[in-house]
Amino acid sequence: MFQELLSIAGTRGPSNLTVFLEVASVIAVVGLALWLVGARFSRQIVTLSGVAAGAIVGKHLPEIFPATSNLSAPVLAVAAALVFGVVTFLTHRLWIGLMLGGMLAAWASFGTWVTQHGQQSWSQPVWDADITLRSFGQQLWTALPPEVTRILPFAAGGAMISGLAMALLWPRIATALNWSLAGATILLCVALTGMAYAKPQWLGALPANTWAQAGIFAGIVLFGAMVQWKLAPKGAVKKKAAPAPPTA
């Protein structure tokens, strides 16, 4: 499992190892925070992400829709940031479902590759200035083994639906699991790439069995989810109705 992640990420090391480790340390701190306390500030994180996305979209709106080219880009950025912020604040549960479903779908796709690729090695299309996102996706799909392409849509689709359903039925559990999974994923990727580039001999100390690696990662995610379950806001508590006055 861990070796497969490294093969997908690539083996070419950074040009400046010191800068890479400094950036990786900052990302690791962010991942640690999401893993342990992300659910406590979930609505704020989602809303601020919506504000940032809205500002970016609004700034580039004249490039996307020429009809708005006569409007001021800063004004559009502020307006879009406000709209996106309000929408993400009001639809927090939906975004948690989409985020959790997306991560579960990504891990389900990765699990399908690990268990079904057989002897075929990972081959990623080269990304250059002439290739589009659609053509990159088509090349990536055609490079996958038949067994992977047969199972992957069902595995990813089922995982996505599961994440959405969990957010709708059990929002507090979904929120805790979402941020724990996000933080653990960031920590795992940073740790593996950091060891591969700075201390490759440490990779030999990791368990070689795929199911053991998956069990360790699942345990980390569950631990973070339990911590966040205790720290996450429980919502408004309904006040007990006052007893009716005694009748004469």
Image (cartoon, rainbow, N blue to C red):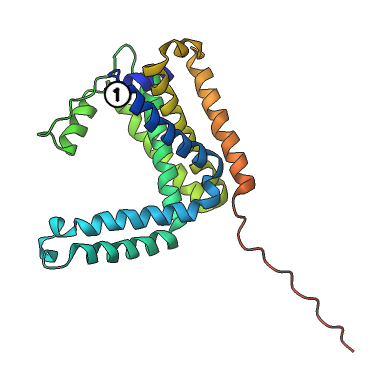
Task: Using the image as rendered, state which of residue 141 and residue 223 is in the foreground.
Answer: 223
Q: Residue at x 47, y 55 (%)?
A: 44
Let me know if residue 55 appears in the view. Answer: yes
The spot of residue 9 in percent (x, y) is 32, 24
The spot of residue 139 in percent (x, y) is 18, 28
The answer to which quarter of the image holds residue 198 is top left
Quarter in which the N terminus is drawn: top left
The spot of residue 105 in percent (x, y) is 39, 36
Q: Residue furthest bottom?
A: 248
The residue under label 1 is: 16
Eyeballing the image, is 174 above or below 27? below
The spot of residue 189 in percent (x, y) is 41, 28
The answer to whether 53 appears left or right of 93 in the picture is left
Q: Residue at x 57, y 40 (%)?
A: 225
The answer to whether 165 appears left or right of 222 in the picture is left
The answer to which quarter of the image holds residue 241 is bottom right
Task: Using the image as rendered, state which of residue 100 and residue 199 is in the foreground.
Answer: 199
Task: Using the image as rendered, state which of residue 115 and residue 238 is in the foreground.
Answer: 238
Q: Amino acid at mark 1?
A: Asn
Let me know if residue 174 appears in the view. Answer: no
Eyeballing the image, is 55 above or below 158? below
Q: Residue furthest front?
A: 18
Quarter in which the C terminus is drawn: bottom right
Element under label 1? loop
Eyeballing the image, is 16 above or below 168? above
Give the class, few, some or many, for how many residues have Cα within 10 Å of label 1's Cα (few <14, many ≥20): few
